[in-house]
Amino acid sequence: MSPKVTRRRLTILGALSAFAAAIGLRKLWRRGEEELRISEEKRREQRAAAWIGFLFSISILAGIGLLIVYALGGQVQLEGALLGISLGGIGLGLGLWGKYLFGEEIVTEEREPLATEAVAATETADMIAEAEHQVTRRTFLTRLLLGAGGAFLVAMVFPLRSLGPSPGNALLRTSWRKGLRLVDENGVPVKADRLVVDGVITVFPEGHTDAEDSQAVLVKVDPNELQLPPGRQDWAPQGNICYSKICTHAGCPVGLFVQALKQLQCPCHQSAFDVLDGAQVVFGPAPRPLPQLPIEADSEGFLVAQGDFPEPVGPGWWSRPSGEGAGP
Ligand code: FES
């Protein structure tokens, strides 16, 4: 073989070797990059998992703390702060979970079976091991999340006790009963001739001067001026007429009597009620007349109730009966 042919063959062999070496180096470089990326991703997930666990744990502690503070009598600012921490912990934890621990969508494509290389088999085994690790971590975090949610719900259920017992028919009845005398704030019974015309006094049922829902205003007017609604002709003996003192708008005490207009006025939003006409509303935001207390004079001349107010006193509410009263 001539030296020229030998030199050419050596050149081709060298070029092929250099090409093969370049491919090998490129593979090594890519693999190194991939391993770096995977390890960085793992570190980030571990950090995220630690933060999520911390936030859920804080949320559990805040929920338990809320329960304890409530059981010890409650403190509004502290309860609010604990409630915020409990909810915030759950919210932030879920946010981190969604951002860092949910893998990106994996799209697969059908292809012909290929022989598995040894390297690929090792990588697959690593992936399975990693997946098992993730399942364990996910289970742990899920339990923490359930704990945080449970603590929050329990802390929310207990304050329901603060709603207290049902009011029953307490909103429908007052302390007025048939035969109870009208007394002033000192407990002194009021006689039918105690007031002069245009005189006013606050009265209570005898024995119940502390019953706020039962307070009433007694006004003396000229009986000939009265224009009471039908059925109330015997409710105002000798011109003594008695209305609930609780405004039907927002519950302020209706304590102003305007003599010239024969009106009771509420100082809060200036509602005005016509004393001569069953306390019909003549001005202001009150939605209905002041309930009138049926009264009469007993054998000794004292004013007594014929029964309770014929309808609930005070402001309305969503299921307030219309025109219905507790009755005598
Ligand atoms: Fe009486 Fe508003 S409370 S008018």
Image (tube, rainbow, N blue to C red):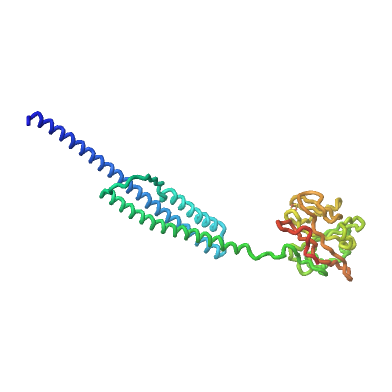
55 and 76: which one is in front? 55
**Residue at the far top in the pictured view:** 4
- Tell me if residue 60 can be seen: no
Number of numbered callouts drawn: 0
The residue at 35%/48% (across/down) is: 41
15 and 288: which one is in front? 15
Left or right: 165, with 142 as reference point: right
Identify the image quadrant of residue 30: top left
**Residue at the far front in the pictured view:** 112
Left or right: 167, with 304 as reference point: left
- Is residue 30 depicted above or below 320 in this figure? above
Look at the image and tell me in which quarter the N terminus lies. Answer: top left
Identify the image quadrant of residue 18: top left
Residue 141, how many percent across, how many down? 42, 57
Residue 87, how many percent across, how many down? 51, 55
**Residue at the far bottom in the pictured view:** 299
Look at the image and tell me in which quarter the C terminus lies. Answer: bottom right
Residue 269, how many percent across, how many down? 75, 50
19 and 241: which one is in front? 19
272 and 289: which one is in front? 289
Left or right: 306, with 46 as reference point: right
Identify the image quadrant of residue 199: bottom right
The residue at 39%/56% (across/down) is: 135
